Image (spheres, coloured by chain):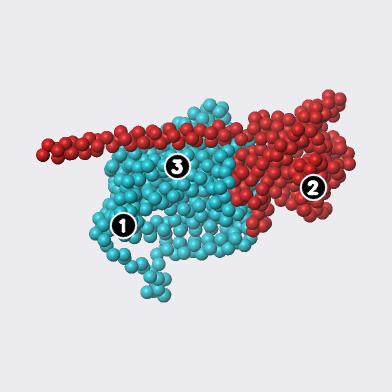
Chain colours: A cyan, B red
Amino acid sequence: MKKALARLTLWQWILALLVLAGAYATYVRVVYGLGGATHLSDRFPWGLWIGFDILCGVGLAAGGFTLAAIVHIFNIERYKPILRPAILTAFLGYVLVVVALLFDLGRPYRVWHPLVMWNPHSVMFEVAWCVMLYTAVLGLEFAPVVFERYAWKKAVRVMHAVSIPLVIVGVILSTLHQSSLGSLYLILPEKLYPLWYSPFLPVFFFISALCVGFAMTIFESWHSSRAFHRQLEAPLLASMGRVLAVLLAFYLILRLLDLLHRNVLALLLRPRMETYLFALEIALMAVPMLLLFRRRIRTSPTALYYNAILVIFGFITNRLNVSVTGMEAASGTHYVPKWTEVAITLSIIACGFAVFWFAARYFPVFPEEKKRIVAARPLEPLPVEGD
Amino acid sequence: MSKAILYDATLCIGCKLCEQACAERNHLSYNESIAGEEKLSAHKLTAILTRGDNHMRRLCMNCLDPTCKSVCPVGAFTKTKAGPVEYDGNKCIGCRYCMQACPFQVPTYEWDKRLPKVKKCDMCSDRVAAGRQTACAEICPTGATKFGDRDALIAEAQQRIREKPDQYVDHIFGVSEVGGTSVLLLSSVPFETFGYRNDLPHEPMPLLTWQVLSHIPDIVVLGSALLGGIWWITHRREEVAAAEAAEKEAKR
């Protein structure tokens, strides 16, 4: 036992600690309710769980539909090697979003209610349906990987036959609800700070989701190549960096035009927290955009990786600005998440990393592994603790 | 005929009997310390606010086109013909979008309960349905809170302002705010003093999201056609190759 504990790496320790803290926070949430587990209030009813776990979680999973469209719809075959990890991340991302939602809902056991109690006028109703359907679609898109692993040939053939309609449905569902997470805030013109409130919120949410979809794919590829000692698809990632630069430029110009046309540019001169956070959000997108237009950056995997991280942080800052910091001034309160909120969020992320690692290790997610598995490789034994 | 409540702050003496009657009707406890709380909460569905000599009431505005009803993913809110906006706690999943979206910050949550519900004034929906007036209007000793037909109450409020223009701000809050509400307010000091916003749109808030949501069927149809079309175009080369191969096969 002692030997096994000593063998755990630093990351495994962190993971274990996070999961323990998350378990205790879950206990607090279940027993003492939202009041005991969060710093939410009547004036500030949505906090970290909505702002980070849901808004960022769904966005960070955008690589799945972006790559599925590129490979299957636009038929750009060379991106195929990174499609499966992207689909896996998206699927895990959505499952974790649903888990986070169960923590946030006052009555989680009624999560299925929108299926039978309809209100098409509600953006939340649309989000609920899209998340549910798209999680199912992602499950089906990832299913062939599992079928291949166990060499279920007939199931693989069936999935192959329906793959194109499935991808189309997936892309449409993603487009709808990536944007509708922005639409959620359209009904709050008097509450969301004017640097962020715009009638174009759904468009901004959609385009920034595309950006972060590419950034996440670069991020994952880099980590997977290290964790599984694989060659990095360098030219592929370089071309993704090019697309990312163009998308970021388009997004930032759109944001600027929006501020211009709404006559709120002058707000940027006010020395307020919102101004600084807005500047941070834009800088985190603009700096990688400028750098990615340089060939030297795109062709260096490490530089590309750090730029992707900047974009991811820019995206997270944007979502938290819209959902938390941009709402504070009008609410008349100051919200700082309670430790339980942070613990649950971090342990959900930790579980995500652990499940991805597990799935990538035991299923043919990466192309190299694929060949070996088709040759009916027997299941590798799981590493047993305490041996 | 749609019913409404008219609250005239100039007649209010701040006795808080409306708070007490409201608590009774909603089976909530009421005591001196709760009377001292000048805000809405899950245990206080109406509140009298005091600033100097002036009073103002807070309660659900029971909007004509309610934002809460529009945003609720399970349709837990209904606007009845008589005027009240009802909440069905058995449908509610606890997403709290109604609290986030309400332009008057009215819905509150039972934060301390394991299985909480949203709480808000429902304009004594059961009493109104039975042809009675709301508990707060019935008990009010000065007539500051008055229950009646909405149109008649608006006419009466206009007349009060006309007769004593120096006593009133020349505005009936709720006639057109967010498309109109079933609670109408008169005051001698600006409504902003008590946190009522003067920058609310005069169109119903649900339009803001509906103008996007109503396009979803179009997006689905057009999107499918476009994506399917792109797929068909980009895969043509493979089709051609397959056809050529088949031709060769046939010639042989």
Label 1 crowd bin: few (<14), some (14–19), many (20+), radius 10 Å: few
Asked if the residues shown at circle 1 and circle 2 are in contact, with their CB atoms under 8 angstroms apart, the answer is: no
Which residue in the structure is indicated by mark 1?
A152
Tell me, yes or no, if residue A66 can be seen here: no
Looking at the rendered structure, the secondary structure element under dot 2 is: helix
Residue A345 location, x and y as percent? 52, 55
Location of residue B206 with respect to B18 vertically, above or below: above
Which residue in the structure is indicated by mark 2?
B22
Looking at the rendered structure, the secondary structure element under dot 3 is: helix
**Amino acid type, callout 3:** Ser
Same subunit, labels 1 and 3: the answer reads: yes
Tell me which chain the residue with mark 1 is part of: A
In terms of depth relative to the viewer, which is nearer, A364 or A194? Answer: A364
How far is mark 1 from mark 3, CA to CA? 29 Å
Q: Which mark is residue A174?
A: 3
Same subunit, labels 1 and 2: the answer reads: no
Outermost residue on the top side: it is B162
Q: Which image quadrant: the C terminus of chain B?
A: top left
Looking at the rendered structure, the secondary structure element under dot 1 is: loop
In terms of depth relative to the viewer, which is nearer, A331 or A365? Answer: A365
Location of residue A24 with respect to A204 vertically, above or below: below
